[in-house]
Image (spheres, rainbow, N blue to C red):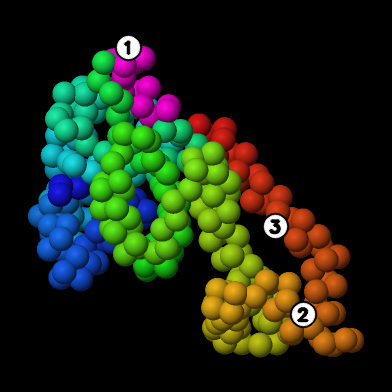
Amino acid sequence: MKISFIGCGNMGFALMSAALRQSGKERTQQNISAADIYITDADSEKARNAAALIGAVFIKSNIEAAEKSDLLFLAVKPQILQGVLNEIAPVVKRKKPMPVLVSMAAGWTISKIQSSIFNESEALTSGGIPVVRIMPNTPALIGKGMIAVSSSPEVTPAKILELKKILENAGIVDLVDEHYMDAVTGLSGSGPAFVYLFIEALADGAVRAGFPRDKALLYAVQTVSGAAAMVHETGKHPGELKDMVTSPGGTTIAGIAALEDGAFRSTVMKAVEAAWKRSKELG
């Protein structure tokens, strides 16, 4: 299987690396090696460096990426995806079998991507374009990502399975109906930034209380990591776990009261909602 990446930003590079983080058995089954991965970017030097880091093949153009690929990752910003699609459309239309287009552009629906390649009459005679829409997040860089996947009917179950095996090396993969993808963008796509802000604020609070900065950050990181693991591994509702920490008249309830005075939960909900709305606007 040949895989091309148009764009090699953080997310693109994370998924390129994931394609190679496989056991020997899986690699034999999927027949993927570094020589099967092609990388291009508007910044040629950036693409050349990314290819060198993982042993992949640097190529010079989006057209060449489309020509060489079975899976074609569109790892570009939503604002420039239209231009990329216009450029690769002639190749995609004539290539048999067509490459599966894998887009991570926020807001861009599967149908919009397809209609940017084929007009309506072409789609009727050609059977449509296989498109997968994914929404990964930055923890995929360390194999701890959350990756939502939805696909068009033209993508075969076998191709979905191949893609899933690749993406699972970057984190948890979940197949979802496409109409959830904007909400996913607001939650897991943008969510890491909200969590980083919370970690920073926790550490700042401890520094304000006189704790050294380096220790404050270490404690904040481990606290958030451990709390997340408790939810994941116990299966308990976060509210139940919160109550386990919250003694009557104690320190934790005093802190929770301060958070509620600042409309903490409402503000977080509004942050996810704002990101969700922006995702829809980008489409």
Of marks 3 and 2, which one's residue comes earlier in the chain? Answer: 2
Q: Which mark is residue 270?
A: none
Q: At x 28% / y 58%, what residue is drawn?
A: 166
Of marks 2 and 1, which one's residue comes earlier in the chain? Answer: 1
Question: Which element carries disc 1, helix, strand or loop?
Answer: helix
Q: Position of residue 60 (x, y in %)?
A: 15, 39
* Amino acid at the residue labelled 3: Val
CA neighbours of label 3 inside 10 A, class few (<14), some (14 to 19), many (20+) = some
List the residue tagged with mark 1.
Answer: 121
Above or below, 141 relative to 73: below
Q: Label 2 to label 1, Cα distance in Å?
A: 59 Å
> Which range is magenta?
111-124
**Considering depth in this image, is 55 or 237 the residue closer to the camera?**
237
Above or below, 179 relative to 239: above
**Considering depth in this image, is 192 or 174 the residue closer to the camera?**
174
Judge depth for marks 1 and 3 and give the one in front: 1
What predominant SS class does the magenta segment belong to?
helix
Q: Which mark is residue 243?
A: 2
* Amino acid at the residue labelled 1: Ser
Q: Label 3 to label 2, Cα distance in Å?
A: 20 Å
| Residue 146 placement, left or right of 14 | right
**Considering depth in this image, is 98 or 86 the residue closer to the camera?**
98
